[in-house]
Image: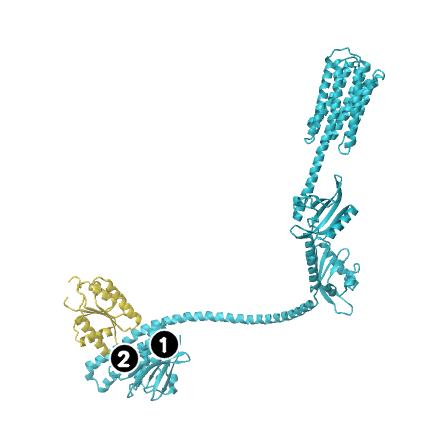
Chain colours: A yellow, B cyan
């Protein structure tokens, strides 16, 4: 439980690489677990499927969630996280291209902790990731683990 | 012992005296009571019988014995008939006659075949008992109760007769036989004869009493009747003495009429009572009475005790009461009748005045068999174009009114038939032509109204010539109108058909519109899906290009030539520009698609917020922004925010290159509309290109001068239009620009 893992749920490999690069550039060296779709993300969080040998109690410190995902989209993933007793307090930051009003509203209604729109300008993206890391990894105090 | 023959003789004399009494009774009362003459006959016959009996021995036996028996019996039967008549119950006597014949035959037998005095005595007594019994029964029981008090005595006498007859029958049957001589001494027979004689006197006496009693009763009843008639008569009756005029009696009618009571008027004269309004009337009345003996229905005026004057009809009769001449006067109060007569005269006069002056013709006349006029007013003859003289000639009406004999007969027949029908609906005749040679024919309408309880009718007539003319004119006008209406109706029908066709076309169009609407909705949905897709998918590659371009510059920038690096920079700028374009297009699309939700918003406050945000974003901005206070509008707040942001951004952008940038947001009123404006002192533009200002992707400046996508003002225009408002701009190259807008609704 000492390791502060970041769970990045993103299907676009370009975005995965750019996000990892942005994290790296900001000297955020935490372990980043990438889930390529919603189903994989839930399997990871609940230690099921291909992640069944994982310790289910080891939860990421923050989840970066894209909305447009194959199989199970971001909103469904968020809903599942909030409905699961173990994961419902997990900080979830929506990181997406959409600025649609209905996505914002749905996201916050389902319990997203933050909503960040990925800017086209990579410099701005690096800045956003920097602030994000600073906030969720350094300043934010997560909810205590239930069985700690 | 008195001699039987002597007794008979005495009986005979008694009978004679009684006969005389009965004759007197008859003479006095024959007019009042029936049957009295039968008593005379009875008594005469009895007398004859007694004479025959007295002459027994000298006269042959058939006369002295048989005839005498027959006569006695006949007389007694007549007596029965006499009582019957007196009490008003005449009966038939066949049984008595049969009995008479039978006993006469029995008598003959016991006289000639087997002479037997006792048998004859029994025969006579039985026969007499038969009749006496009927008499007693009639007088005591059959007589009406009112007459019983008078006949009762007679009935009792006959009861005694019956008893004696029974006794005589018994003696004849059971007494000592052997008496063959009728006149032989016999104490019983002598007693019987004396008793008969007494009863005969009693009978005569009771008859006289009976007649007298009834006479008295009748007189009393008569008096009662007169008394009642006198006193209860509704007429005022007064009885006066002719010699001095003193009032003897008055009735209740008189008391009521004059107001004087019976006591007050008794003994006084009518003059003393001041009844006569004029003394001369009294003298004239008396003279006439003395002269004619009676007066009938003389009208006079009397003064009542109250002083009121009344009119009365006086009838009087000179009568004699107790030897003195009296006057019986009766007075009938006709004051009311007089007043009614007067009222009737007045109302008749009024009716006549009304009828004389009615605007229609009125007449009272008979119709069948002859038209005879009792009355006709002036209009009646005027409307019929004739004269009173002409219609008053015997049955002259038809000829006077209808000149043409043929028309006259037709109308006359019709009118008589209609009148005979007694149907009020048929007694109206309209538009009858009144023709006169050399004159225009006029027309009248007439109506007959039967006058109740008489054979007369009220004939009315009025001139309808003008009405008929007017009617004809109206008819012609109506016809013309109808023709016009028909014409117009036809035109209307044609127009209607055309309209119907148009409606059909419209319906078709509406159907097409609905279809178009459906497809539009589908398009809108597609567009929404498209926008969403654009927002996600179009930006992702741009991020990759920019991201990796940036990575390449950072990681391997030193390996590239300056030119290569410049190219990479330009790729990145183009990418970011592309990103902005996508954002603006999405914004424009949202403005078009979202629902308009108006509410009252404070535009001034909204503008201040926007300026605040702008200043925070670009700290070095030196633009002076002047916002008018209290600008409010009923508009969609989200869309208005977008519009204001675009307009204000625009203003800042184009003032960024002047020395003292200034932006004003305010409002004025033009023709009742609130016009908002945002004015700047920036670079402005040439009004030549004002038309291109609000087009999508239209720009009036070069991007390197003022960056922009050319979508902002298109978005603003779309927002203003969606609110039903207008937007326009005024500008001058180098001197600034002003954007004006209204918000409709």
Give the crowd class for mark 2: few <14, some 14-19, many >=20 residues within 10 Å: some
- Measure the alpha-carbon separation of dots 1 and 2: 21 Å
Q: How many marks?
A: 2
Q: In which quarter of the image is residue B44?
A: top right
Q: Residue at x 80, y 20 (%)?
A: B50
Q: Where is residue B722 in the image (x, y as percent from the top left)?
A: 38, 75
Q: Report the chain holding disc 2.
A: B
**Residue B119 horizontal side relative to residue B643, left or right:** right
Q: Residue B719 carries which label?
A: 1
Residue B102: assigned label: none
**Is residue B695 in view?**
no
Could you say which quadrant of the image residue B323 lies in? top right
Q: In which quarter of the image is the N terminus of chain B?
A: top right
State the SS at label 2: helix
The C terminus of chain B appears in which quarter of the rendering?
A: bottom left
Q: Nearer the viewer, mark 1 or mark 2?
A: 2
Q: Is residue A59 above or below residue B84?
A: below
Identify the residue at horizontal 29%, vertical 81% (top origin).
B577
Can residue B717 be seen here? yes
């Amino acid at each position: 439980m000492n390791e502060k893992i970041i769970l990045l749920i993103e299907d676009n490999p370009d975005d995965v690489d750019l996000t990892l690069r942005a994290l790296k550039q900001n000297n955020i060296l935490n372990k980043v677990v990438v889930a390529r779709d919603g189903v994989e993300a839930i399997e990871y969080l609940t230690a099921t499927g291909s992640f069944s040998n994982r310790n289910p109690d080891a939860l990421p410190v923050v989840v970066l969630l894209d909305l447009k995902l194959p199989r199970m989209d971001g909103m469904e993933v968020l809903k599942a996280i909030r409905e699961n007793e173990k994961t419902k307090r997990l900080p979830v930051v929506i990181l997406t291209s959409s600025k649609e009003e209905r996505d914002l509203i749905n996201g916050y209604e389902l319990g997203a902790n933050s909503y960040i729109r990925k800017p086209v300008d990579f410099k701005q993206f690096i800045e956003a990731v920097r602030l994000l890391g600073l906030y969720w990894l350094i300043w934010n105090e997560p909810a205590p683990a239930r069985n700690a | 012992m008195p001699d039987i023959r002597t007794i008979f003789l005495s009986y005979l004399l008694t009978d004679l005296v009684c006969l005389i009494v009965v004759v007197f009774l008859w003479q006095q009362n024959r007019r009042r009571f029936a049957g009295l003459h039968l008593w005379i006959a009875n008594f005469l016959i009895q007398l004859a019988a007694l004479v025959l009996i007295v002459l027994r021995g000298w006269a042959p036996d058939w006369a002295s014995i048989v005839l005498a028996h027959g006569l006695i019996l006949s007389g007694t039967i007549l007596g029965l008939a006499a009582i019957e008549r007196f009490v008003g119950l005449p009966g038939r006597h066949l049984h008595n006659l049969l009995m008479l014949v039978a006993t006469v035959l029995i008598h003959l037998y016991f006289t000639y075949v087997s002479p037997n005095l006792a048998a004859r005595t029994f025969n006579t007594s039985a026969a007499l008992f038969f009749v006496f019994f009927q008499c007693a029964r009639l007088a005591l029981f059959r007589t009406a109760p009112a007459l019983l008090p008078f006949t009762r005595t007679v009935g009792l006498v006959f009861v005694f007769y019956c008893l004696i007859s029974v006794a005589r029958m018994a003696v004849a049957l059971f007494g000592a036989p052997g008496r063959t001589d009728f006149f032989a001494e016999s104490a019983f027979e002598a007693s019987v004869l004396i008793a008969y004689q007494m009863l005969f006197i009693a009978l005569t006496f009771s008859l006289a009493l009976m007649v007298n009693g009834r006479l008295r009763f009748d007189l009393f009843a008569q008096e009662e009747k007169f008394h009642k008639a006198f006193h209860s008569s509704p007429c005022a009756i007064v009885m006066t003495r002719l010699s001095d005029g003193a009032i003897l009696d008055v009735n209740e009618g008189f008391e009521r009429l004059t107001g004087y009571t019976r006591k007050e008027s008794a003994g006084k004269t009518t003059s003393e009572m001041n009844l006569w309004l004029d003394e001369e009337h009294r003298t004239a009345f008396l003279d006439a009475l003395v002269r004619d003996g009676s007066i009938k229905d003389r009208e006079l005026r009397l003064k009542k005790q109250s002083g009121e004057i009344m009119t009365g009809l006086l009838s009087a009769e000179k009568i004699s009461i107790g030897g003195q001449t009296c006057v019986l006067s009766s007075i009938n109060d006709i004051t009311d009748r007089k007043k009614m007569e007067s009222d009737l005269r007045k109302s008749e006069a009024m009716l006549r005045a009304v009828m004389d002056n009615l605007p229609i013709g009125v007449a009272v006349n008979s119709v069948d068999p002859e038209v005879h006029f009792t009355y006709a007013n002036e209009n009646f003859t005027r409307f019929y174009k004739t004269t009173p003289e002409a219609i008053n000639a015997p049955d002259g009406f038809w000829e006077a009114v209808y000149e043409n004999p043929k028309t006259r007969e037709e109308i006359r027949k019709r009118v008589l038939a209609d009148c005979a029908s007694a149907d009020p609906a048929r007694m109206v005749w309209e538009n009858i032509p009144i023709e006169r040679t050399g004159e225009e024919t006029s027309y009248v309408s007439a109506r007959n109204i039967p006058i109740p309880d008489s054979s007369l009718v009220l004939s009315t007539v009025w001139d309808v010539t003008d009405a008929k003319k007017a009617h004809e004119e109206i008819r012609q006008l109506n016809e013309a109108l109808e023709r016009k209406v028909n014409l117009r109706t036809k035109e209307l029908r044609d127009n209607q058909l055309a309209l119907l066709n148009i409606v059909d076309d419209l319906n078709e169009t509406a159907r097409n519109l609905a279809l178009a609407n459906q497809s539009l909705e589908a398009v809108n949905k597609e567009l929404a899906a498209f926008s969403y897709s654009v927002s996600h998918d179009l930006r992702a590659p741009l991020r990759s290009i920019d991201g990796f371009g940036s990575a390449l510059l950072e990681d391997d920038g030193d390996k590239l030539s300056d030119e290569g690096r410049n190219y990479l920079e330009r790729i990145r700028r183009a990418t970011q520009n592309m990103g902005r374009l996508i954002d603006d297009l999405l914004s424009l699309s949202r403005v078009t698609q979202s629902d308009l939700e108006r509410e009252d918003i404070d535009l001034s406050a909204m503008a201040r917020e926007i300026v605040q945000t702008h200043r925070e974003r670009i700290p070095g901005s030196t633009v002076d922004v002047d916002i008018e206070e209290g600008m409010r509008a009923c508009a969609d707040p989200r869309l208005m925010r977008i519009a204001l942001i675009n307009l204000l951004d625009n203003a800042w952008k184009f003032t960024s290159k002047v020395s003292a940038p200034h932006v004003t947001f305010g409002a004025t009123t033009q023709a009742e509309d609130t016009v908002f404006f945002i004015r700047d002192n920036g670079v402005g533009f040439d009004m030549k290109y004002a038309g291109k200002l609000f087009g999508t992707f239209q720009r009036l400046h070069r991007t390197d001068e003022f960056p922009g996508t050319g979508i902002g003002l298109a978005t603003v225009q779309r927002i203003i239009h969606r609110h039903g408002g207008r937007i326009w701009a005024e500008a001058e190259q180098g001197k600034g620009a002003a954007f004006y807008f209204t918000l409709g609704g």
